[in-house]
Image (cartoon, rainbow, N blue to C red):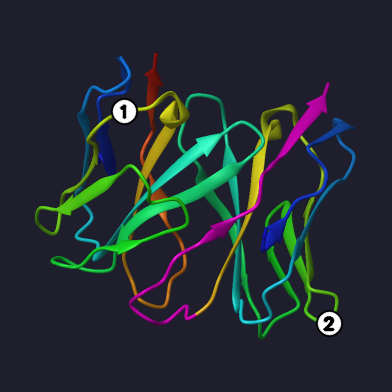
Amino acid sequence: DQQVKQNSPSLSVQEGRISILNCDYTNSMFDYFLWYKKYPAEGPTFLISISSIKDKNEDGRFTVFLNKSAKHLSLHIVPSQPGDSAVYFCAASYNSGGSNYKLTFGKGTLLTVNP
Amino acid sequence: NAGVTQTPKFQVLKTGQSMTLQCAQDMNHNSMYWYRQDPGMGLRLIYYSASEGTTDKGEVPNGYNVSRLNKREFSLRLESAAPSQTSVYFCASKGQPNTGELFFGEGSRLTVL
């Protein structure tokens, strides 16, 4: 049973436009959500996160929105740049302050930003 | 500033051979993790270690063993490799208890023939 779902395997947008990546989760115990970015032949790197007590977190061009009632989060990138082209993974966790902390990842969405 | 270092970066094995993937972090982190990434499957947790001296199974532990040698090092062993273990393996570590961010290594690409 997949607890974190990214239903769009790929997304293509024009440079300067908005990119919206979506993620759904099924486990209502999740209390912390993260987005990771991954370039080919590199490890994933942390991008932005949000706690379940918030509904929005912004960091420069990146904003994450959380809708707990719908068990849905999204990552907005504005404006999109060609260097943003990468695979984006949504991840979730619970017991975020505890010792047995672990992340559950979605399958990823390949974002392509065209010049 | 090395962060999380994995070795080897590439390895080809024959079915039935054994090998160990090494991981070391220099950030004084307590928790360490091994994930595998397969096409269309995302990142799946194999094993993790919440602290030195403890290890726990993740989502896909079968066919693997781990050792938390000390606070810095967390190794993943394949005792008898199978083609289904062909994958890219990532080691990660986590520091502060209330910070959810995991730091990943660059990955180890393993092919089992």
Labelled disc at residue B39:
none
At a point 38% along the width and 81% down the height, the residue shown is A98
Query: Residue A109 lies in what quarter of the image?
Result: top right
Measured from the top left, where is residue A78 in percent x and y?
A: 81, 48
Q: Quadrant of residue A65?
A: bottom right
Residue type for callout 1: Ala
Return the residue nearer the eye: A100 or A11: A100
Image quarter hosting the C terminus of chain B: top left
Task: Determine which residue is flagged by label 2.
Answer: A69
Q: Quadrant of residue A39?
A: top right
Chain letter of the residue carrying label 1? B
A97 is within the stretch colored magenta = yes
The mark lying in front, picked from 2 and 1, is 1
Q: Which residue is denoted by mark 1 in the rendering?
A: B81
Considering depth in this image, is B85 or B9 the residue closer to the camera?
B85
B80 with respect to B112 (left or right): left
Span colored in magenta: A95-115
Is residue B58 part of the magenta span, yes or no? no
Badge 2 and badge 1 in a common chain: no
Compared with B31, B89 (above or below) is above
Separation of disc 2 and disc 1 at Cα?
A: 44 Å
Q: Where's residue B99, x and y in %?
A: 43, 71
- Position of A5 compared to B88: left or right? right
* Residue at 35% across, 76% down: B97
Determine the secondary structure under disc 2: loop
Disc 2 marks a residue whose amino acid type is: Ser
